[in-house]
Image (cartoon, rainbow, N blue to C red):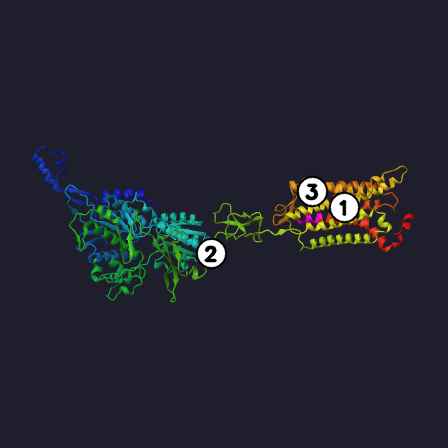
Amino acid sequence: MEIRPVLVGLRLLILLDRMSVIIVGGSPKDLNQGTKTSEALTGATAEASSMKCSFQGTPRLPAFSMDGDFTIGGVFLIHDKVQTVIYNYTTKPYPLMCTRSLDARNLHFSRTMIFAIKEINNSTKLLPGIKLGYQIYDTCASVTVASDVAFQLLNGQDPVFYKGSNCSQSGVVMAVIGDSTSTTSISLTRVIGSFNVPLVSHFATCACLSDKQQYPTFFRTIPSDQFQADALAKLVKHFGWTWIGAVRSDSDYGNYGMASFLAAAQREGICVEYSVSFFRTDPQSKIQRVADVIRSSTATVVVAFTASGDLRFLFEELAREPAPPRQWIGSEGWITDLNLVRYSFCAGAIGIAIQKSVIPGLREFLLDLSPTELTASSVLTEFWEDVFYCSLKQNSSLIKRVCDGTEDLKTLNNPYTDTSQLRSTNMVYKAVYAAARAIHNAVCQETSSTTLCDKDIRLESKQVLTELKKVNFTRNGYPVSFDANGDPVAFYELVNWQKSESGVIELVTVGYYDASLPKGQEFRINRNITWMDYKTKVPVSVCSESCSPGTRKVLQKGKPICCYDCIPCPEGEISNTTNSPDCFPCPSELWPNAQRDACFPKPVEFLSYDEVLAIILAAFSVSGACLAIITAAIFFHHRTTPIVRANNSELSFLLLFSLTLCFLCSLTFIGAPSDWSCMLRHTAFGITFVLCISCVLGKTVVVLMAFKATLPGSNVMKWFGPPQQRMTVVLFTFIQVVICTVWLLLSPPFPMKNLSTYKEKIILECALGSAVGFWAVLGYIGLLAVFCFVLAVLARKLPDNFNEAKLITFSMLIFCAVWLTFIPAYVSSPGKLTVAVEIFAILASSFGLILCIFAPKCFIILFQPEKNSRKSLMNK
């Protein structure tokens, strides 16, 4: 609630209507005219020295007062309501009066101030020989009354006073202790600050009061709400609550405090479903709307930055209609108020509280109220009559009985008598000692043995203000000092409402928040916490459940950042943290697991000997080599037979040798590629196949030339004898050797990891190095095969007994078909299947050659030996 413009008007109103003075004793007419004679001047001087100053308005009486050498003011919210007055502007306004709604807690504070001053007056170390007085006023929780009290403190209580020509009474109080709310403290410090009178508050926590440009004379013994807001945000974050409701008092305390908390919550990534405000004087309908918002919300955690007097009205409204369980998080303004624990729906509340302390002798002082004190103070009389429901006056009404003297404060369970957890009380106690220490430093001088104080010195409040900035002492083990903003070092206790074995709600300290510790270490919990409905499990309050690793957060349109959907990471990406905003790809050689929350090495794939396919291909390869060797052995054993001799036995043995190498070279394609295996598999394959085709080509040429040589006058065979056949085979093979050598020298094949064919695995394969070299090797083989096939076709109609043309034609047809099919299959086959296709092509073409060319001859040799004779061949 903004009060600054109101304060300006109030100042003028109070100055003019209530606290104005009138000067009496001299004639205004004489003073205006003046005389130039020395007699007239002397008379004027005499009259001026006898001017009398008096209050025009009615002085406000303090609730408690005592004279002393130096006076300290006190301002407390002893009553929480002020009477409503409608001015008719026909009579002089009187000071606003407080209604009968006494706040026992603030009465406790005001009596604590009296106790501290009595302790100081009895001390021989602090202000020895000097008596401190006090004037304690009641603000009735009203800004208007607070402003009135401020001027009363500045001018004193005497209705008539003499100050020569200067009627200013500033300096009557050296310092002021109070108030209990930030709003009234702002009003007070704006007024008394103009006269350099310091205000030391025990309970005004608004962060705005740390602004020394606006409030240069304000100090406090309670930490600023800025620290409390940070502590509350860390508390909420600590338990994983990201979706909360926020309730605040519609006052400077609530509005500034909640603004600080919301900023801190945003930094911690906490979202607020709703933020509502109210004040105790609001219409019941507004408080009911706030309660309905809390009931209908989805957030199970409610952070309440309110004064206890305000929150009581909200709790009463919530108690009318049971609401879903809510975990209440409280500010220091209400979390330690035992009057609120009776509301069962606040079970397990947790919040930030002022440090619990001990003040020796205070309880005895509070309980020791003599009849004289009771009758001398209207406030104490009211308190006594309220708590015991009796009257101290004999002629009281029949509603209340007359107090009979058996009433005992020790039997009461009341905020006034409660000294089990002196929290804010210690802030009052420290504030009084801080003001007294400042006065001590201003009027006393320390020597080696004694302390000398001058009570007759004319002490100005500005001196006290200067000394107050420097105070640094410890009282009852609790440090007292102020920083440049007038704030103390922030230290809070974390308080939890827990039910004892007897069923009574107790305030249990479960942790601490110390702003003096390094960042990240300020907040700690050292005891078990009881939650709403006194459960031990931490309640959950989130807009969306946490996204598990393997997913990422996607914000829901139009909603806060805490409301999101969890989307699985795309293929090849992972997220390994909870609530990850993004997924990131795995390194090139790693791949996500099934949950997509970790990267693992990709499985490496190659044609291994452990695989069934490799075993089958290796078996065929070895079988083919064995078949070639067996065929060679059969041919060697029957080398003298006509069928072997008739088909160029030398080329046949060379062909069988090359076929054996062809079968065996396919084994180099199986297993993990290496530098040597990659170079060997392609070159061995290319050279052995050329050797094989060269032998077939030689046999075909010999058949053709043999029949050409039978023509009259032909002399062709002398150019195609055994030496020429050997030279042809060597020449054709040498060309392939040259091609392979150039390939290996310029850009040889090498092992590589193929990461592109499959995303989820690595293919170990042999890179070609130079594709030109690879296709040159294949092209040369194909060229020889086509040439051989053409010659075989030309010789196919020659007599069957003297040539192999038909068999060679069929074998070359198979060879060409296999390798023509190989090219597209090789290009399109992925991974290890590429190697399998290449092995299959080698084995198929090799088996085609050996079966087509040698199988019929071996069959005759082994099973039809009668046909393996010259006579049989000639007959055919």
| Residue identifier under label 3 | 740
Could you tell which of marks 2 and 1 lies nearer the N-terminus?
A: 2
Amino acid type shown at disc 3: Cys
The answer to which of 3 and 267 lies nearer the viewer is 267
Q: Is residue 247 left or right of residue 717?
A: left
Q: Which residue is mark 1?
A: 692
Name the residue carrying label 2.
540
What percent of the width, then of the height, locates residue 60? Answer: 22, 50
Q: Is residue 170 visible?
A: yes
Q: Is residue 738 above or below residue 564?
A: above
Amino acid residing under circle 1: Cys
In this picture, which residue range is highlighted in magenta? Answer: 822-838
The reply, left or right, for residue 759 in relation to residue 115 is right
Classified by dominant secondary structure, the portion drawn in magenta counts as: helix
Q: Position of residue 354 (x, y in %)?
A: 33, 56
Marks 2/3: CA–CA distance: 73 Å
Q: Residue furthest left?
A: 39
